[in-house]
Image (spheres, rainbow, N blue to C red):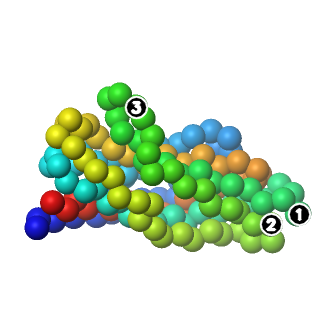
Amino acid sequence: MGIKFDYLGKLGVDVPLVVGTRKTIPKSRWKPPRGNATLEPTVYLNLHYTNTHATKPGRAWVRMMRENPADSTLNYFLWLPPGYSVMIDERCPGHKWWGDSYLGRNVHFEILVTGVKSAYLNDSCYVAYDQKW
């Protein structure tokens, strides 16, 4: 069994998000080096937000995008509850089989925040990828 692991580093600066507009997470673009291997990304989000409503939660939609052609995979949602201002989440959103036909394609992560007044990604956020074969 072989393993390739790449930690792409922390953002290093806070990244403002435009509510209702999808944003590519900086330092999340990667080209898997092998085909016929399992791709397992890890996403660490330190998301700061200001709620719009006192009783309704906001929501963050995170997804991995394969490029050329663009198609999404490994989608997940985070609720942004009222009464709080920070959502910290680290997860491997799933495993993706990376076949030989995907070789040469990059991947990256995107985030879309809705239902809040404002939001930003703290400088400590990061993305890491590993492949196992």
Residue 31's image quarter?
Answer: top left
Residue 55's image quarter?
Answer: bottom right
Judging from the image, what secondary structure is the residue with disc 3 in?
A: loop
**What residue does disc 3 label?**
70
Query: What amino acid is labelled 2 in the image?
Result: Pro
Q: Is residue 28 above or below residue 133?
A: above
Q: Is residue 12 left or right of residue 133?
A: right
**What residue does disc 1 label?**
54
Residue at the farthest left position: 1
Q: Is residue 95 above or below residue 24?
A: below
Front residue (pair 118, 110): 110
Q: CA distance from mark 2 to mark 1?
A: 6 Å
User: Can residue 120 be seen from the camera position used here?
Assistant: no
Q: CA distance from mark 1 to mark 3?
A: 37 Å
**What residue does disc 2 label?**
82
| For marks 3 and 2 on the same chain, the one whose residue lies earlier in the sequence | 3
Please rate how many residues cluster around mark 3, counting C-alpha atoms within 10 Å: few if below 14, some from 14 to 19, many from 20.
few
* Mark number, residue 41: none
| For marks 2 and 1 on the same chain, the one whose residue lies earlier in the sequence | 1
User: Can residue 2 be seen from the camera position used here?
Assistant: yes
